[in-house]
Image (cartoon, rainbow, N blue to C red):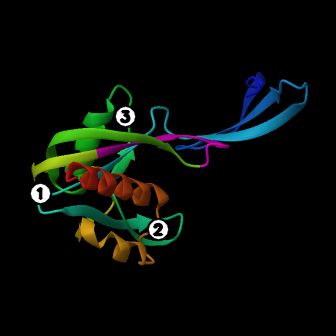
Amino acid sequence: MPAKPQILSVKTVAQSRLFRIEQVDLRFSNGVEAAYERLHGAADGAVLVVPLREDGHVLLVREYAVGVERYELGLPKGRIEPGEDVLTTANRELMEELGYAARRLTPLAALTVAPGYFGHVTHVILAEDLHPQRRDGDEPEPIEVVPWRMDALADLLLREDFSEARSIAALFMVRERMANEYE
């Protein structure tokens, strides 16, 4: 594998409340120089939580997704606040979006989406031993909670309103983990 390219310069070309776009000038090990752009999200990343009930149902949320301009089913998720650890964020998001907290939180993976230009990490957390506990959040409208049987994952994948790759990957990770526990 060749050596990593040398970063010659980094400059911000645009910034919003949520994102920063940077131009990164690189020199590769063969001497070629190139300019790349990258998008930065929340500094500490985000969590995506798989709330799994003892009866084998996962709790999905239906909320408006402005990027695709429709209501989408997915897993609870949110930005890691400055000074907050991943598991605290996961439990906070559960309480805000579902009205539940988890007694057992297990980190499963850290995922990237389009790492060629998007510098953002999402931490996938399995939440088990759920109990009712609500906390006010920043959602603009009530979020619908939709229980879904993990053994009906194939049917979920056929739905038009379930398309987020991170949620799909997280559910497959949990399904694989569940299968390995029963072997």
Q: Amino acid at mark 2?
A: Ser
Identify the residue at the far right of this view: 31
* Numbered tag placed on residue 124 in the rendering: none
Q: Is residue 134 above or below residue 149?
A: above
* Numbered tag placed on residue 54 in the rendering: 1
Q: Amino acid at mark 1?
A: Glu
Give the foreground label among 1 and 2: 1
* Residue pointed to by mark 2: 163
Query: Residue at position x 37%, y 57% from top?
Result: 172
* Residue pointed to by mark 3: 81
Q: Residue 146: x percent and y percent?
A: 24, 69
> The residue tagged with tag 3: helix, strand or loop?
loop
Range of magenta residues = 114-125
Upstream in the sequence, badge 3 or badge 2? 3
Residue 97 included in the magenta stretch of the image: no
Q: Nearer the viewer, residue 9 or 140?
A: 9
**Distance between mark 1 and mark 3 Cα atoms:** 29 Å
Q: Residue 144: x percent and y percent?
A: 25, 68
> The residue tagged with tag 2: helix, strand or loop?
loop
